[in-house]
Amino acid sequence: MMKPSRSEFIDIRGLRYHLREWGAADADAAHTWVMLHGWMDVSASFQFVIDELPDDWKIVAPDWRGFGLSARATADCYWFPDYLADLEFILDAVLRGERAWLLGHSMGGNIALVYAGTRPDRVRAVVNLEGFGLRATAAEQAPDRFSQWIDELKAGAALRDYASRHEVAARLMKNNRRLSPDRAAFLAEHWAVPDGSGRFAVAGDPAHRIVNPALYRIDEVLACWSQVECPVLWVRAAQSDVLRHVGPDHEAALREVDARKEVLRNVTSVLIEDAGHMVHHDQPEQLAHLITAFAQQHRSQL
């Protein structure tokens, strides 16, 4: 049985932000987790894991700016540092200065780790699901990147629409062969919204697809990671395809990911079999067990 969620809307840096919450509204900070979804996803994506977590936990999951039910940015593209600032304001509102348990998937995992290194006194622990960063770039790539960005701004961005939520669910199952029809149907309710013409549009700003003009500077990212003081649970899915964004081939990408992980001071690494990049959809029961054990281990030490 799915745990019910509730919605709250708060103002974050001039944007109407949607927070999805599960569990006891009055839970203390020691039993409150903030979960951060990935790129082109929504907060409801964590439902299947949350269904398996302890009932006395409170979970708060924002829809990032320009995703889900949160407002879209007034600019014509999105910048990674904005997510870090948004997270700080969200934690201020949710935890009132208490340290946070953070869980992030993919982009959300990258945000969680950079934030934990930027504000180490604000974070109790991090669970990083498949948030390994991107391929390192070189300064020589800057001219072409700026040119591509300008071209994409001029052309505009678009996302395909769908005739029905059933069609949305079918697309989700095509993207992830491990996704069951009932889970796909649930996700389709949140991943797409009516567009006013009888069709359904992805619940995300098309501008997210415009390339970022700022190069990915891995040295800066690792400098932040090196300042993370809290324990980190590092989760990789055995059949993930995300490594292609890190290195030129699978083995090179694995070596790069392992080298990056070594920067963290207190990290526990776990490999989950029979799971792809959407590990929280593929193995939610196993993942919930790992998260619960991790929390129990470190709650007594904090």
Image (cartoon, rainbow, N blue to C red):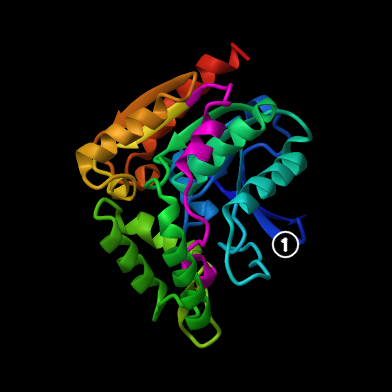
Q: Would you name the residue on which mark 1 appears?
A: 16
Q: Residue furthest top?
A: 301
For the N terminus, the image quarter is top left
- Is 194 rendered above or below residue 294? below
Give 69 or 226, whichever is nearer the viewer. Answer: 226
- Is 297 rendered above or below residue 36? above
Whether residue 230 is visible, yes or no, is yes
Residue 83 location (% of width, % of height): 62, 50
| Residue at the (59%, 12%) spot, across then down | 300
Q: Quadrant of residue 74?
A: bottom right
Residues in magenta, as a range: 205-232
- Left or right of 188? Residue 12 is right
Residue 66 location (% of width, % of height): 59, 64
Q: Quadrant of residue 184?
A: bottom left
Q: Residues within 10 Å of mark 1 (few under 14, many from 20)?
A: some
Q: Secondary structure at mark 1?
A: strand
Q: Residue furthest front?
A: 140
| Residue at the (40%, 49%) spot, across then down | 137
For the C terminus, the image quarter is top right
- Residue 7: in magenta span: no
| Residue at the (30%, 67%) spot, across then down | 170
Residue 251 location (% of width, % of height): 20, 37
- Left or right of 150? Residue 124 is right
Q: Amino acid at mark 1?
A: Arg
Give 18 or 186, whichever is nearer the viewer. Answer: 18
